[in-house]
Image: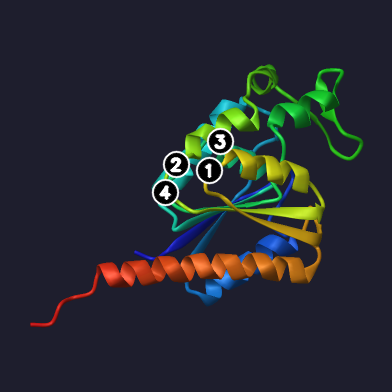
Amino acid sequence: MMRSVIYIAGMFEDGTNPLFLDIQALAKKLQVSCKYIKLYSGTTFGSYSYQNEIRRINEIVSKSQPSLIIAHSLGCYISTHLPVLCPFILIDPSVSITDIILPNIKRGGYDDGTYTFKVSPSFLNSVKISEPIEVLVRNIKNTGHHIYIFGAGRGGYRIAEQYHQNLVGSIYFFLPNADHEFSNRSSRQRILQVIKKRLDAKQSSRSRGTRIKSS
């Protein structure tokens, strides 16, 4: 079976950001399948409950059985709901969806000054009961799987540090010149180095496991 990587996007990512394109190019070079998961793909963000969106993503992950899950921004918070079956790389994680959505609800819809959209009652109610980071990360404590966290010095690195503090055994990288979108190429290269290392390690492990003893 071909190895695969899953990338869980941030809130309004569309697959054209340089970070994902670089990851996609690396995966192709390493002959690894790369699947992009857009939040609320095929519909309007907030059109149905947050818990239903988690179930949709979990089904994709379970079916794909990836060698590595890479998540960015809100995608990192989403990933804390998933059963840990492989290593994670969390890139400048966001706060809980509650803290993102509720402060920008105006007249029954979402408006942060840049993005405006309607939200369904089921979505709004589901967001209100979502859990904070320190509770959710209990899902992925002490699993034996490697968790790598990148904090952007010009982005949300303090939130990334919260993830690191609450995730036992996680490895943290601080990238001082990076912004939240990782528009700086050198910061993306640092992330790619870790991705390649993890995929190479996974491949080496599989090779050792399938070695046939000569008679």
Ranked by sequence position, the earlier of labels 4 and 3 is: 3
Q: How packed is label 3: few (under 14 Cα within 10 Å), some, or many (20 or more)?
A: some
* Horizontal side, residue 65 vs residue 125: left or right: left
What is the secondary structure assignment of the residue under circle 4? loop
Q: Between label 1 and label 3, give the one nearer the viewer.
A: 1
Q: Which amino acid type is marked by label 1?
A: Val
Q: Which residue is mark 4?
A: 144
Q: Amino acid at mark 2?
A: Asn
Res. 142 mark: 2
Residue 130 picture location, percent across and down? 63, 24
Name the amino acid type tagged 4.
Gly
Q: What's the CA distance linking mark 3 and mark 2?
A: 10 Å
Q: Which mark is residue 137?
A: 3
C-beta proximity under 8 Å, tags 1 and 2: yes
Q: Secondary structure at mark 3?
A: helix
Residue at left 61%, top 28%? 50
First in sequence: mark 1 or mark 4?
4
What's the distance in space between the residues labelled 1 and 4, CA to CA? 10 Å
At horizontal 42% and vertical 64% (from top left) the residue drawn is: 3
In the displayed structure image, the side of residue 101 where residue 75 appears, left or right: left
- Across and down, in percent, residue 32 comes to 48, 68
Q: Nearer the viewer, residue 75 or 196?
A: 196
Residue at the far bottom in the pictured view: 215
**Cα–Cα gap, marks 4 and 3:** 14 Å
Residue 198 x/y as whole percent: 50, 65
